[in-house]
Amino acid sequence: MARNPGRNQKRQEEAQPGKRPDDTARRTCLISRTIHPRAHLLRFVAAPREGLTEDVAGRLPGRGVSIQPTRRHCVALLRRQDLPRRLGVSTLVLPPGEVLQGRVAQALERRLIEGIGLARRAGRILPEWSEAEVERLFSDGGQPLLLLARDAPDAVRDAMAALASRHAATPPLAPFDREVLGRAGGWKEAIALVIPAGKIARRIEADATRWITFSSP
């Protein structure tokens, strides 16, 4: 019987604790069977004591399964009768749906806030953004990450959207209101944050995308 090298490689990667996710890797959602960047999915593993456990950083050891980051997909995951087998265990403790959804929401929000704080401490957030400065970042060959407050003024929202559109970049992401966005970066509030292209920007973009998707009605 012919072997499937892609599947074998996936299992080897998922069994290595602490392995950092590859930005280019893609995974199939167990529920919808659609393929997405691994960083945009939610991974779950079977923890020895906790049972089904969310792995928002993608680094916990053991076999895992991935789903799209929505509340509906979390509920559908709990209904999978083959979930223990897929996670490599004989029995699995499952939390109630609302409990799992609450845990995932907290974990995604916390990871996003931690990422923004990390970027601030590393000096990877522009202290004051301007259209000219963002244009310079685009001209340097990278695509900076544009974060907007949900309650940002329309003028700021339109200006950032226009910048992204001119450079065929990812549209601005709006994960929090101005108070939460500001506190994440160490300020009282923030209307917009610009993070130059790089590893930390890619992490925050993926985490913001997951959080926005999960927290949407």
Image (spheres, grey):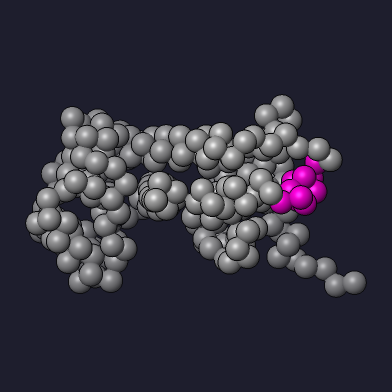
Task: Confirm whether the magenta stretch covers residue 158.
Answer: no
Range of the magenta residues?
80-89
Of 216 and 60, the residue lying toward us: 216
Name of the residue lying farthest toward the top? 49
**Residue 14: percent from left, percent from top:** 68, 48
Instruction: Decide if residue 5 is on the left or right side of residue 181.
Output: right
The quadrant the N terminus occupies is bottom right
Task: Confirm whether the magenta stretch covers residue 85.
Answer: yes
Is residue 194 in view from this perspective? no
**Residue 179: percent from left, percent from top:** 22, 34
State the predominant SS element of the stretch in magenta: loop
Instruction: Decide if residue 163 is on the left or right side of residue 103.
Output: left
Vertical order, 191 against 8 (above or below): above
**Residue 156: percent from left, percent from top:** 12, 54
Residue 49 location, quadrant? top right
Vertical order, 76 against 117 (above or below): below
Seen at 20% across and 63% down, the residue is 161
Instruction: Decide if residue 44 is on the left or right side of residue 104.
Output: right
Seen at 67% across and 29% down, the residue is 50
Residue 164 location, quadrant? bottom left
Of 195 and 74, the residue lying toward us: 74
Instruction: Decide if residue 136 is on the left or right side of residue 44.
Output: left
Is residue 170 in view from this perspective? yes
Name of the residue lying farthest toward the right? 1
Total marks shown come to 0
Vertical order, 39 against 188 (above or below): below
Of 117 and 28, the residue lying toward us: 28
Seen at 39% across and 51% down, the residue is 217
Seen at 58% across and 47% down, the residue is 74
Residue 145 location, quadrant? bottom left
